[in-house]
Image: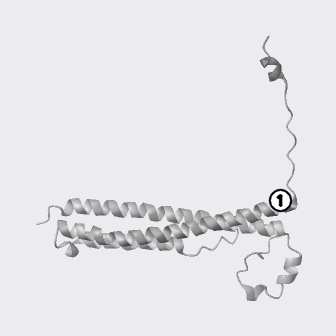
Protein backbone atom coordinates (compact mmCIF):
# COMPACT_ATOMS: atom_id res chain seq x y z
CA UNK A 1 0.00 0.00 0.00
CA UNK A 2 1.30 3.43 -0.96
CA UNK A 3 1.93 6.15 1.58
CA UNK A 4 0.91 8.93 -0.81
CA UNK A 5 -2.77 9.06 0.18
CA UNK A 6 -1.81 9.27 3.82
CA UNK A 7 0.54 12.12 3.10
CA UNK A 8 -2.09 13.89 1.04
CA UNK A 9 -4.57 13.71 3.93
CA UNK A 10 -2.21 15.33 6.37
CA UNK A 11 -2.76 19.04 6.18
CA UNK A 12 -0.06 21.13 7.68
CA UNK A 13 -1.27 24.27 9.29
CA UNK A 14 0.91 27.22 8.52
CA UNK A 15 1.89 29.28 11.46
CA UNK A 16 0.30 32.69 11.43
CA UNK A 17 2.67 35.27 10.03
CA UNK A 18 4.70 36.93 12.70
CA UNK A 19 4.50 40.68 12.53
CA UNK A 20 7.80 42.41 12.08
CA UNK A 21 9.14 44.31 15.03
CA UNK A 22 9.44 48.08 14.92
CA UNK A 23 13.19 47.79 14.48
CA UNK A 24 12.76 45.35 11.57
CA UNK A 25 10.24 47.66 9.88
CA UNK A 26 12.56 50.64 10.22
CA UNK A 27 15.47 48.60 8.88
CA UNK A 28 13.30 47.49 5.95
CA UNK A 29 12.35 51.09 5.17
CA UNK A 30 15.98 52.23 5.42
CA UNK A 31 17.02 49.48 3.00
CA UNK A 32 14.18 50.47 0.66
CA UNK A 33 15.41 54.06 0.69
CA UNK A 34 18.99 53.00 -0.01
CA UNK A 35 17.85 50.75 -2.87
CA UNK A 36 15.64 53.44 -4.44
CA UNK A 37 18.38 56.07 -4.21
CA UNK A 38 20.85 53.67 -5.84
CA UNK A 39 18.38 53.03 -8.66
CA UNK A 40 17.90 56.76 -9.20
CA UNK A 41 21.67 57.31 -9.34
CA UNK A 42 21.95 54.37 -11.76
CA UNK A 43 19.43 55.97 -14.14
CA UNK A 44 21.36 59.25 -13.95
CA UNK A 45 24.67 57.50 -14.62
CA UNK A 46 23.26 55.44 -17.49
CA UNK A 47 21.80 58.58 -19.00
CA UNK A 48 25.12 60.43 -18.80
CA UNK A 49 27.02 57.54 -20.39
CA UNK A 50 24.42 57.02 -23.12
CA UNK A 51 24.36 60.76 -23.82
CA UNK A 52 28.14 60.92 -24.18
CA UNK A 53 28.19 57.87 -26.46
CA UNK A 54 25.33 59.30 -28.52
CA UNK A 55 27.03 62.67 -28.99
CA UNK A 56 30.36 61.07 -29.91
CA UNK A 57 28.63 58.78 -32.42
CA UNK A 58 27.52 61.75 -34.49
CA UNK A 59 30.99 62.44 -35.93
CA UNK A 60 31.38 59.09 -37.72
CA UNK A 61 27.73 59.16 -38.81
CA UNK A 62 28.19 62.62 -40.32
CA UNK A 63 31.35 61.43 -42.09
CA UNK A 64 29.44 58.48 -43.55
CA UNK A 65 26.64 60.75 -44.77
CA UNK A 66 29.18 63.20 -46.24
CA UNK A 67 30.86 60.31 -48.00
CA UNK A 68 27.57 59.29 -49.54
CA UNK A 69 26.74 62.81 -50.70
CA UNK A 70 29.16 65.74 -50.52
CA UNK A 71 26.55 68.50 -50.21
CA UNK A 72 24.58 66.87 -47.37
CA UNK A 73 24.84 69.93 -45.10
CA UNK A 74 22.70 72.03 -47.43
CA UNK A 75 19.90 69.49 -47.78
CA UNK A 76 16.61 69.37 -45.81
CA UNK A 77 17.65 65.92 -44.57
CA UNK A 78 20.48 67.50 -42.58
CA UNK A 79 18.03 69.89 -40.92
CA UNK A 80 15.78 66.99 -39.97
CA UNK A 81 18.74 65.02 -38.61
CA UNK A 82 19.95 68.02 -36.61
CA UNK A 83 16.49 68.51 -35.09
CA UNK A 84 16.25 64.82 -34.19
CA UNK A 85 19.78 64.94 -32.75
CA UNK A 86 18.98 67.93 -30.53
CA UNK A 87 15.66 66.42 -29.39
CA UNK A 88 17.40 63.20 -28.40
CA UNK A 89 20.05 65.10 -26.44
CA UNK A 90 17.28 67.00 -24.65
CA UNK A 91 15.55 63.73 -23.73
CA UNK A 92 18.75 62.48 -22.09
CA UNK A 93 19.01 65.80 -20.27
CA UNK A 94 15.40 65.38 -19.18
CA UNK A 95 16.39 62.16 -17.39
CA UNK A 96 18.93 64.16 -15.39
CA UNK A 97 16.51 66.99 -14.67
CA UNK A 98 15.37 67.01 -11.01
CA UNK A 99 11.96 65.57 -10.26
CA UNK A 100 9.67 66.87 -7.56
CA UNK A 101 7.23 64.28 -6.21
CA UNK A 102 3.55 65.00 -6.61
CA UNK A 103 2.15 67.09 -3.74
CA UNK A 104 -0.69 64.65 -3.05
CA UNK A 105 1.52 61.57 -3.12
CA UNK A 106 1.67 61.34 0.68
CA UNK A 107 -1.77 61.77 2.18
CA UNK A 108 -0.89 60.45 5.62
CA UNK A 109 -1.46 63.20 8.19
CA UNK A 110 1.33 61.79 10.37
CA UNK A 111 3.98 62.51 7.72
CA UNK A 112 5.51 65.95 8.21
CA UNK A 113 8.21 65.70 5.55
CA UNK A 114 11.06 65.75 8.05
CA UNK A 115 13.36 63.30 6.29
CA UNK A 116 14.26 65.57 3.39
CA UNK A 117 13.49 69.15 4.30
CA UNK A 118 12.62 71.07 1.13
CA UNK A 119 12.60 74.55 2.67
CA UNK A 120 14.68 74.71 5.88
CA UNK A 121 13.82 78.36 6.51
CA UNK A 122 10.09 77.67 6.56
CA UNK A 123 10.33 74.74 8.97
CA UNK A 124 13.29 75.75 11.16
CA UNK A 125 11.21 77.13 14.04
CA UNK A 126 8.97 74.07 14.34
CA UNK A 127 11.33 71.30 13.21
CA UNK A 128 12.23 70.16 16.75
CA UNK A 129 8.58 70.03 17.84
CA UNK A 130 7.54 68.15 14.72
CA UNK A 131 10.44 65.73 15.15
CA UNK A 132 9.42 64.86 18.72
CA UNK A 133 5.84 64.17 17.61
CA UNK A 134 6.81 62.36 14.41
CA UNK A 135 6.22 58.73 13.67
CA UNK A 136 9.55 57.49 12.36
CA UNK A 137 7.92 54.71 10.35
CA UNK A 138 5.45 57.11 8.73
CA UNK A 139 8.25 59.53 7.80
CA UNK A 140 10.38 56.76 6.28
CA UNK A 141 7.38 55.31 4.47
CA UNK A 142 6.64 58.72 2.96
CA UNK A 143 10.25 59.00 1.81
CA UNK A 144 10.13 55.53 0.23
CA UNK A 145 7.01 56.51 -1.72
CA UNK A 146 8.60 59.76 -2.92
CA UNK A 147 11.75 57.97 -4.05
CA UNK A 148 9.71 55.25 -5.78
CA UNK A 149 7.88 57.97 -7.71
CA UNK A 150 11.17 59.60 -8.73
CA UNK A 151 12.66 56.23 -9.72
CA UNK A 152 9.64 55.36 -11.88
CA UNK A 153 9.69 58.79 -13.53
CA UNK A 154 13.40 58.60 -14.32
CA UNK A 155 12.98 55.07 -15.67
CA UNK A 156 10.20 56.20 -17.97
CA UNK A 157 12.23 59.20 -19.15
CA UNK A 158 15.26 57.00 -19.80
CA UNK A 159 13.18 54.60 -21.90
CA UNK A 160 11.91 57.56 -23.96
CA UNK A 161 15.50 58.70 -24.53
CA UNK A 162 16.52 55.20 -25.63
CA UNK A 163 13.58 55.01 -28.04
CA UNK A 164 14.52 58.42 -29.42
CA UNK A 165 18.09 57.22 -29.90
CA UNK A 166 16.88 54.20 -31.83
CA UNK A 167 14.61 56.42 -33.90
CA UNK A 168 17.48 58.79 -34.63
CA UNK A 169 19.74 55.96 -35.83
CA UNK A 170 16.91 54.64 -37.98
CA UNK A 171 16.49 58.12 -39.46
CA UNK A 172 20.23 58.27 -40.19
CA UNK A 173 20.05 54.89 -41.90
CA UNK A 174 17.10 55.97 -44.06
CA UNK A 175 18.90 59.24 -44.86
CA UNK A 176 21.97 57.29 -45.93
CA UNK A 177 19.84 55.14 -48.24
CA UNK A 178 18.17 58.23 -49.72
CA UNK A 179 21.42 60.15 -50.14
CA UNK A 180 23.35 57.21 -51.52
CA UNK A 181 22.37 58.14 -55.07
CA UNK A 182 23.27 61.79 -54.67
CA UNK A 183 24.49 63.48 -57.86
Q: In which quarter of the image is residue 72?
A: bottom left
The extreme top residue here reads: 1
Residue at 32% x, 73% y is 82
Residue of label 1: 24
Q: Can residue 64 be seen in this view?
A: yes
Q: Quadrant of residue 58?
A: bottom left
On-image quarter of the N terminus:
top right
Q: Can residue 80 be seen in this view?
A: no
The front one of 69 and 99 is: 69
Q: Position of residue 168 (x, y in %)?
A: 35, 64
Residue at 51% x, 66% y is 46
Q: How many marks?
A: 1
Q: Where is residue 24 in the image (x, y as percent from the top left)?
A: 83, 59
Residue at 47% x, 69% y is 49
Image height of 108 relative to 126, above or below: above
Q: Taking 26 as reference, is 103 left or right?
A: left
Q: Taking 73 as reference, is 41 left or right?
A: right
Q: Where is residue 107 in the image (x, y as percent from the top left)?
A: 76, 67
Image height of 130 relative to 178, above or below: below
Q: Taking 17 as reference, is 86 left or right?
A: left
Disc 1, SS: helix
On-image quarter of the C terminus:
bottom left
Amino acid sequence: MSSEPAVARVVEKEAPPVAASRRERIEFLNNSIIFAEANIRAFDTKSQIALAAFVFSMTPLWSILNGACNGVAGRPTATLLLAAFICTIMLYGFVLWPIRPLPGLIKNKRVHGLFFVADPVAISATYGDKLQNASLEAELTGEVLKLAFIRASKGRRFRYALWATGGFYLLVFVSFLLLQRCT
